[in-house]
Image (spheres, helix red, strand yellow):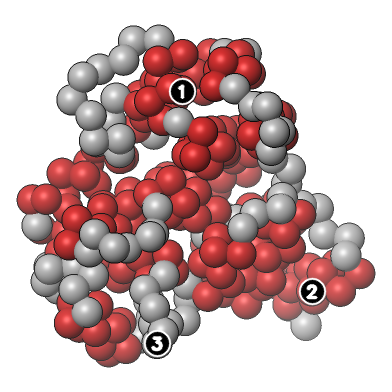
Amino acid sequence: MSAEQELLQVIQQKLVDDTLTLPTLPDVALKVRQQTEMANVSLKSIADIISQDPALAARVVKVANSAFMGRSIKVSTLSQAVTRIGLTQIRNIVIAMALEQIFMTQDKALQDQLAWQWQRNIQITSIAVACLAFYNRQNQENVLLLDVITLAGLVHNIGALSLIQEISLCKDTLGDSRFLQHVSAKLAPTISEKILRSWHFHDDIIDVAVNWRQLKPNADHVSYTDFIRLAMIAKDQYEDKNLQQRLLNYYVKQNLVPSDKFMQEPEINMVYQNIRAVFT
């Protein structure tokens, strides 16, 4: 048995024994979530929590001034930013902005892997948000929310975070991206579900993490998972290219995107660039 096969068995056994180390949400994200669950929550109390993290506060202001919110008049303070974003979206936005903290470590080799994974998440998220924004403009009765797809995009493969940390224990294997991809395809959905349930995330977001690898749409309704799949197609991430093209053709026919070259559409590409800028 190879070292890679042994490591895969170790990870699988840890899943069975429920001993795999799972990441925890950043403290500021937990505090904001707890605050938004209170009956007497106020925007000021949320702004006070966010202000304890200057980098996060700056990003929240950036979000409030971005195309994400669709406003032309700029805000300059955190209080104004939180007010503009509003109670219905601030929870998901803060969690999304704070997630980068769990993709950081002092281990240089490990940090390279985590940084690559985070940047990949940003790209997938930005494409998905841009596509959903287009779809929403064409379907006014649609109930899919941009803040939800943002959070779903950033955690769609969160299980890979635990896998990277486990694989880092075997330094020779850490640098083999093919092994990480193989293990992720096999185990990441299960681990992602465990993580997101431990974080008490909504089923819509868990569904994305569990099902985005499946190259078939939900026959009943358009879902957040469909827009993550569109982002994967845009990045040519699926191995079965024929099935990938068939799914794209279906999405075009269903008017989720205007054409099979949807990232070349100015309306979609502009939003994509604007969302990416929020995270840099």
Sequence order check, earlier mark of 1 and 2: 2
Q: Which amino acid does label 1 sit on?
A: Val
Give residue 74's position: percent from left, percent from top: 25, 17
Residue 227 visible in the shown view: yes
Give residue 253's position: percent from left, percent from top: 17, 82
Q: Nearer the viewer, residue 15 or 92?
A: 92
Q: Which amino acid does label 3 sit on?
A: Ala
Quarter of the rendering occupied by the C terminus? top left
Give the vertical position of 46 relative to 107 (above or below). above
**CB under 8 Å between discs 3 and 1:** no
* Residue at image point 82% right, 59% down: 20
Q: Name the residue under label 2.
A: 12
Give the SS element for disc 2.
helix
The quarter of the displayed image where residue 259 is located: bottom left
Q: Nearer the viewer, residue 57 or 231?
A: 57
Q: Nearer the viewer, mark 1 or mark 2?
A: 1
Q: Residue 219 carries which label?
A: 3
* Residue at image point 33% right, 57% down: 128
| Mark 2 surroundings: few (<14), some (14-19) or many (≥20) residues within 10 A | some
Distance from the alpha carbon under mark 3 to that under mark 2:
32 Å
Distance from the alpha carbon under mark 3 to that under mark 1:
37 Å
